[in-house]
Image (tube, rainbow, N blue to C red):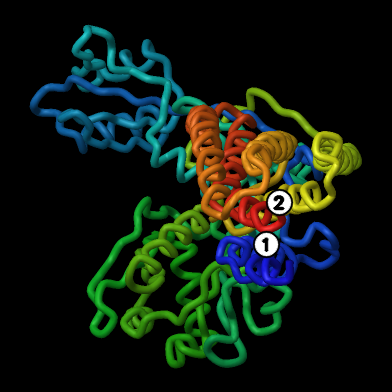
Amino acid sequence: MKKSERGLLGDIRVMALLLCVLAALFVIYVYPPPPAGAGINGNLRYGLDLVGGSSLQLKLNGTLVAIDAPDTVNTTKIVEFLGNELDTEVTPYTADDRVIYEIRKSVTKEQLSEVLKGINSSIAKRPNGEDFFEDSLTPATREETRRIIENKINMLGLASTTIRTVGNNLMVIDFAGIDIKTAKDLVGKPGKFEIRMQTNGTGEDIEKGQRLEEIENITAHVMYGSEGIENVGTTPTSKTGKWEGEVWGAPFTLNKEGAVALRDAAIKYGAIDSPADHELAMLLDDVVVYSAPIADEACEKLKEGVIYVWTANTGSGDEGKEEARELIIHLKAGALPVNVEIIGSGEVPAYLGVKFKEGALIAGLLALISVTLVVYLRYREPKIVLPMFFALLSEVILILGFSVVVPGGWQLDLPSIAGIIAVIGTGVDQLVIITDEVLSGGRSSARMYRKRISFAFGIIFASATTTIVAMLVLALMALGTLRGFAFITIVGLLFGIIITRPAYARVIEGIM
């Protein structure tokens, strides 16, 4: 028996299971350090079902249209004309060898047709004869909207949002831990963008992420974005730096009041003569989103007059480009690129969320204990039941650990808990198949045991594959909260057939 035990502890399958469980516990409770007061929750994140919060169903107002215009009316003229007549941003893009215009505003087909008469144009036809007119938006605009909402939530230090897209212009947003009024304000209202100038200290005293109270004594107010910023570029710009190669930046234009305020502050606080120690800091909702010295060439120009067109350099490479995209969003004060219409909403009070969490925990434990009891009644052998119980428990821990490390994090909600319970149910079925195959022929040689286990795994792989394929349909179709159920079920099945089932088979072989 001792030899068998030594063999089990040294088996790569058992060791892999133990190491994975320890790694899962490590990411849940040790690193990254859990939030203060997290307790048994560690780094686990919960959806609004389990902590309370609100949900908004949004319609993004926008129109996609193709236009037939005379040869004398080019794309630029169409964009300028529609922008002026409709008082909104119009962006052209090419698809299927034709120019399509994204109008960031909802207009009816009749309204647009009437407007287009001003340039002797009309709505183009599709190959099937229908008008090329959609109440829709481009994927890029939907993604920009999602990023802005996430940035607002993250800057407030609140739980991340869960955003699901439905069709081309609908979004369902779950705000965990946020009441319905705050959620509506976050979606509908822009933030407060402020530019400040460093007055004391040395370079790099101001860092991204600091709050206003941390830098207020070493900075002075220059302007608010709503007062001084006239226009913000839609995409990052780049230039070739002398030493760094291609440098990315966020372009923006100041109005006269803003340009004068910035020049006066640069002169008053010494940024013209010592830019490194008098950085230009940008804050959104009192949080620093950018801080850097004014470029030397800009300082020389400020000595002679005002500068209207600026670029906030963010660095080189993909990282610099991504930071420039984020800064453009901040410069717009977190305003959404399109108007949104709230077409539905719901709220789960915090106290009710706590009750749901307690109920979900009890349901999970009861499921684990119940299946273990049923297995005991079948085999009446603790040496079989205990390994099976710990295999199932290990699987749950692995799923929870994975929910922490998955990019962006995964919020556990009621459908996710249902997925964990489903994994426990399918898991015990597969463990019973392994156990029955091992016991069916009585005591045999190691070679015969492995042959029986191989037969059991053939059945398990076939069963798991069909379930995963079915769950993939739910996961990829984004059918609301069913995605959480499908995702957790798939992850649990993969952990089972790759890690826990092989380890359990080795343990049961060693025991028998």
> Residue at coordinates 67% horizontally, 72% vertically from top-left?
6
* Residue at disc 2, secondary structure: helix
Question: On the rendered image, what quadrant is the N terminus found in?
Answer: bottom right
How far apart in space, not on screen, are marks 1 and 2 (Cα)?
Answer: 10 Å
- Residue 295, visible in the rendered structure: yes
Mark 2: few/some/many CA within 10 Å (<14, 14-19, 20+) = many
Instruction: Specify the label residue 391 is tagged with.
Output: 2
Compare marks 1 and 2 and give the one earlier in the sequence. Answer: 1
Asked whether, in this view, residue 432 is left or right of residue 462, the answer is right
> Residue at coordinates 52% horizontally, 57% vertically from top-left?
330
- Residue 339, visible in the rendered structure: no
* Residue at disc 1, secondary structure: helix
Q: Is residue 416 above or below residue 271?
A: above
Mark 1: few/some/many CA within 10 Å (<14, 14-19, 20+) = some
> Residue at coordinates 26% horizontally, 85% vertically from top-left?
243
Residue 35 image offset from top left, x and y in percent? 77, 65
| Amino acid at circle 2 | Ala
Asked whether, in this view, residue 447 is left or right of residue 308, the answer is right
Residue 394 image offset from top left, x and y in percent? 71, 54
> Residue at coordinates 62% horizontally, 56% vertically from top-left?
506
Residue 193 image offset from top left, x and y in percent? 58, 59
The residue tagged 1 is 21
The one of 217 and 288 positioned closer to us in this rendering: 288
The quarter of the picture where residue 373 lies is: top right
Q: Is residue 129 above or below residue 502?
A: above
| Amino acid at circle 1 | Val
Q: Is residue 444 above or below residue 456?
A: below
The quarter of the picture where residue 129 lies is: top left
